[in-house]
Image (cartoon, rainbow, N blue to C red):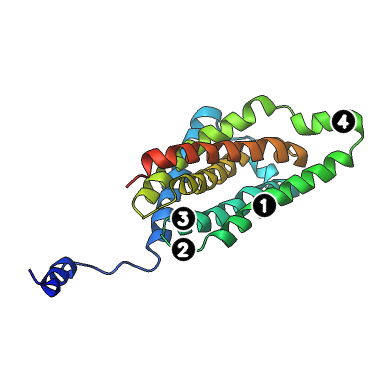
Amino acid sequence: MRTSDLILRLTNNLTPIESNFSSKRLNRALSVGMASSTVLLVVLYGIRSDMPELLLTTMFWVRLAFPVTTLIAALNLAGRLGRPGAPVRLAWLVVTLPFITMLLAATFMVFATPPGYRLQLMLGTTWRVTTANIVLLSLPSLAAVMHALKGLAPIHLILAGTGAGLLAGAQGLLVYSLYCSEMSVPFWGVWYVLGISITAGIGALMGPLYLRW
């Protein structure tokens, strides 16, 4: 068989791929994950009776800023990790900015508080369950995002799994923030960051196993 015939046969049934194919695939995964996590939250914990009043407080929206900015940055990162050759260095830098900002704000608040009250700021009343709840609510999104990445072409599987975990963890935290009663920045800087980090670690472990071609 001539080379030209082989090339023609290989390319005969090719169809063009949309330029935003990876973004659409990840957005669909996030929609499924968000719906599943929300249902899981309602089934396990119900809906807060003071939600209308909570929506009128400034700290509620300040708290949402961390998972929302992390989600946006992690979505860009995961999309790039699913495309071979896409530059990711800047995307990694951007995804760390919400964490750095949160940790700096938490550290400032701790040192600005009298020593006798610092531990209470970091522990709140739900520190024993917050991280576990975030990870639990992140699992539906993690499964959906990992499946979406598997349909792309990730080559650095540990990093791709980490990106998927960051994205899923941010979405899980976003859902949990609708229920959580803690309004202390140091609390967020410890247990919220830990919840996303653990989910990213789970994704890193799953990456080489699930995303392998």
For marks 1 and 2, give the CA distance: 22 Å
The quadrant where residue 49 appears: top right
For marks 3 and 1, give the CA distance: 19 Å
* Residue under the image location 71 percent in, 40 percent down: 188
Mark 2–mark 3 CB contact (< 8 Å):
yes
The residue to which callout 2 is attached is: 86
Residue 88: x percent and y percent? 53, 59
For marks 3 and 4, give the CA distance: 43 Å
Say left or right for 182 vs 134: right
Furthest toward the bottom, the residue is 4
Label 4: few (<14), some (14–19) or many (≥20) C-alpha neighbours in 10 Å:
few
- Nearer the observer: mark 3 or 1; the answer is 3
Furthest toward the left, the residue is 1
Mark 3–mark 4 CB contact (< 8 Å):
no
Mark nearer the N terminus (3 vs 4):
3
For marks 2 and 3, give the CA distance: 7 Å
The residue to which callout 4 is attached is: 117
Mark 2–mark 4 CB contact (< 8 Å):
no
Q: Please name the amino acid that badge 4 sits on.
A: Tyr
Q: Is residue 93 above or below residue 165?
A: below
